[in-house]
Every structure is written in structure tokens, then in C-alpha cells.
Image (cartoon, rainbow, N blue to C red):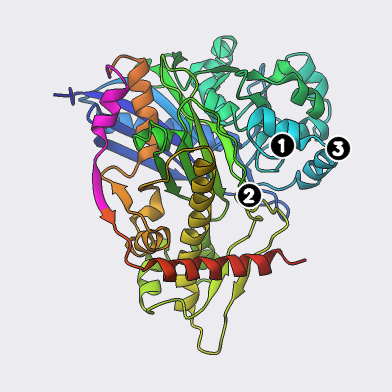
Amino acid sequence: MPDTQCAILALDQGTSSTRAIVFDQAGAILARCQRELPQSYPRPGWVEHDARRIWTDQLSTAREAIAVVRARRVVALGVTNQRETTLLWNRATGEPLYPAIVWQDRRTADLCDELRAQGLEPEVRNRTGLLLDPYFSGTKLKWLLDHIPGARAQALEGKLAFGTIDSWLLWMLSGGAEVATREQAVHATDVSNASRTLLWNIHRQDWDDVLLTALDIPRAVLPQVHASGHLYGHTVPGLLPESLPIGAMAGDQQAALFGQACLQAGLAKNTYGTGCFLLLHTGNVAQNSHHGLLTTAAAQATGQGPQYALEGSVFVGGAVVQWLRDGLHAISASAEVEQLAQSVPDSGGVVFVPAFTGLGAPYWRPDATGTITGLTRGTTIAHVARAALESIAFQSAALLGSMNADSQAAGGPQVAELRVDGGASGNDLLMQFQADLLGIPVVRPLVLETTALGVAMLAGLSCGVYAGVGAIEALWKPARRFLPGLDAERARQRNQEWEHAVRQTLTP
């Protein structure tokens, strides 16, 4: 039996909140603390975060969570993070040179167009598995080096550090928070976060000199890269009640794939958060996509070789519910959307394409804008709310259709079930509609905090809490299976209605 006195701390730094969750060895949640993270929109298409606020909130939530379980023995710490969000800081002073540029930020769209016109995209695709899009970190970093006076010169001299949020938190935890310990701070990231930068060669497992040259980024600014499950260092004394080994780091979606026990080729999960992120594990094969998906590194446990996944990203998932709340004031709290949507039998012909920041996979149209079609005099705010929820499922169905097509082309299997997590996966109406559209079971696990659970498991593996990956697979348990209730022809028609609305969105 697992030793439930043994606990693991997961730091889960997301787009809209900063959290700390403590798990026992069996994967049960012992404590959970959270702070909402303010968003900054200084210009249309720009999204920024206060990196100092992220650090202070992460530290305070970690301390609070540990205090709740003070009778337990916390033996390891793992960090999972919003990916692609880009930060540049001074190694000597510890100060960020600019706010963190969030993954949703579109300020480098013109730069991506220029690089695409120069013929760089095939190189990017072949080397990184990604597309040239403002979503990723590389063009954000170039923007920072180009626009902050003196930044590129300082970077060349080794005075600056670039990182995604995992790197920033690791640096602060391991010494960067205080002048006296700053020289020992660890500047590193893991393969899953590195693979989202446009700069990491997923085949050679190294930073790519061709792409660094194309974006004019010096190697001196980049972090070291390790497996996701790796002993990165220890928290410096005084930050937490005890110095803890930092045993794992992973981008949030790869951590969730691990936490969902999707550890073999053919298993898929979808996380319903601010955006939606659908990943299909492809084993140790970096499978190319011909349907607008990304090839990315999956979380790599201690002792494993490189692992890969196909990924599709929906830029606006749960954020559409936030827009109903904050933009239209249709609801006062996000949790009210399900009841409002259920007050009508269907969307009344309304289709909502929430392309607030362009469209991600499989469309990749940063110029797309939001569209609502099918409005009549009989349309109510309840129909719009239902269409907003349905938009999350429609976008995810388009992703899974592309994944199945890629898998079939490579001689692989079709996805037999979709494992789901994230805040919106608790919405039964949405999950049932998702199963209806896909025609396969949608499975919600007992523990919905799979992002934090995944990195806790990775940390447990690297710190000796678990004997091997097989122990992780045994911990995953389903809570509810949503079975398709719509006949295949009607599901096909509904998906066609969505694609028709998307075409209207993309019309110049």
C-alpha cells in the first residue's frame, strides 16, 4: 500500500491563477491554495503578466499549502507552468526587464509574416515540429531583445536570462530570490517547455543554431535543458519550512498528459482551461502532422528517452465563459453558465466562433476575429451562452478529427476515448456534447487536477517515491464516462455547421 504520510508539493502556475497543491503518494489532494492572477492588456492583441507578482503569489501559496499538511512529510517539489509565456531578467539584480509576455499575446504576428515570407517556416516545422506563429516564445524573445534598450548587448555578455515561467520559478526557488544566494540559482528548463520556444530541435534534443541565427538570439541567454523528471536542485533554506528537492518541471499540458496516465501511443487527453489543449501521445516517434497540428515533446520521466505527442491548441476555451461574465455581463459567475445554457433545449441555430485572439489549430489564422451566426429575433442570451459552451466542444472536435487523420496516415489507431480535465471538464452539459460530437466516450477522472498531479508524479519518480512509470498508470481512476447520445449523421451535420461558421470568420 502507498505511504500516504509521504507528500509531494506541486506548484501550478497558470494563465489565470497561481496555485500550490499537495498530494499524498496515492494521488489524493491534501491541500490546495490559489491566487487569481491579474491580466494586463496594454494594447489590442497584447497580453502581459507581472512576473514579480507570479513569484510572490507562488511562494505564498506554497507556504500556505505546506502549513495545511504540516503533519505530513513533504519530500519533493515539482513545477508546472503556462507554456510559451516569455520572460527576460537580469541575472545580477534578479529584476525582470519587462513584464512577462503571455502565450496569448499576438504582437509578433507581423514578424512571423516576415519570417514566413523569407521561407523560414519549413525549417521551423522540420526542426521544432511547430509553425511560425506569435503563440510561441521565440519571436517574443526576439521582440524583447529588439525593443528593450541595451538588451541584446547584455544578453551577448551573459548578463540576462530568458525563460518560460518554469525557469523563472526554478531560478527564484534555487537562490534567485535573494542577493546572497543569487549566484547559485539554477537557470534551466525541461524538454516540454523547450519544445515550445521555436528554438529547440526536437530531433537533436538541443537548441538549434539555424533558428537562433534566424531570430538573432544568443545562446548565452538560454537555459539548460533536462528531462521533465530530473533533480534540478533544492529550494534555498528559509524559503519554505524545509529545503525541498525540485524533482520535476513540465509545461502544463504535457504534465496533464502524464497525470492522465496517457503514457503510451494512442492515448489522448483534452484540458479545458482558459484555452483547450488536446494531446495525443505518439510514443518515442516524433510524428509529423499534415492537418495543422504540432509535434511536441511529451513529458519525459527520469530514465526515459525522448517522448513525443501531437498537439492541437484552442486559444479561447473557458475564456469564452469569462467573456460572457465580464464582457456581456450575462452571468455574474462562471459557474452559472451551465444552468443558463440548460434553460434552452439547444442553441437555436446560433453558432459562436470565439476567435478573440485568432484561431489556433487546425486553422492557424491569427487574423480571424470572433463571429456569431444564426441570430434571429427569437435568440436569447441563453442561446448565446449555449453556443458559447458548444464552441469549446466544436473546436476540440476539429482537433481530434485532425489527430485521427494524422494517426491513420501513419498507420496508427484511431483515438478510442478522450480523457478530460481542467475546470470546464466539470461542466456535464459540455462533456456530454463533446461525446456527442466525437462519437467516442469522454472520460473524466477522479482527480481533475491532472496538471499538478502529473508534475507531482514526475517529481515523485525522480525522487524515489515511485518505483517506475507502471506505478503511475495504476493510480489513474475514472470518475464518469460520458457516452455518445447523438447519431453519427446528426453529429456530422453539427460539425459541418461549425466549419461553415469558421469559413465565414475567415472570409476577408
Q: Is residue 348 left or right of residue 365?
A: left
Q: Position of residue 218 (x, y in %)?
A: 76, 19
Rendered image: mark on residue 118: 3
Magenta run includes residue 479: yes
Q: Position of residue 417 (x, y in %)?
A: 35, 48
The residue under the point 78% across, 13% down is 157
Residue at image point 54% right, 24% down: 191
Question: Is 385 included in the stretch rendered in magenta?
Answer: no
Q: Which mark is residue 422?
A: none
Q: Badge 2: few (under 14), some or many (20 or more) residues near its Cα, within 10 Å?
A: some
Disc 2/disc 3 C-alpha distance (Å): 32 Å
Read off the residue under disc 1: 140
- Taking the spot 75% from the left edge, 37% from the top edge, the residue there is 121
Amino acid type indicated by mark 1? Lys
Q: Which residues are magenta?
A: 466-480
Residue occupied by mark 2: 40
Q: Amino acid at mark 3?
A: Gln
Q: Secondary structure at mark 1?
A: helix
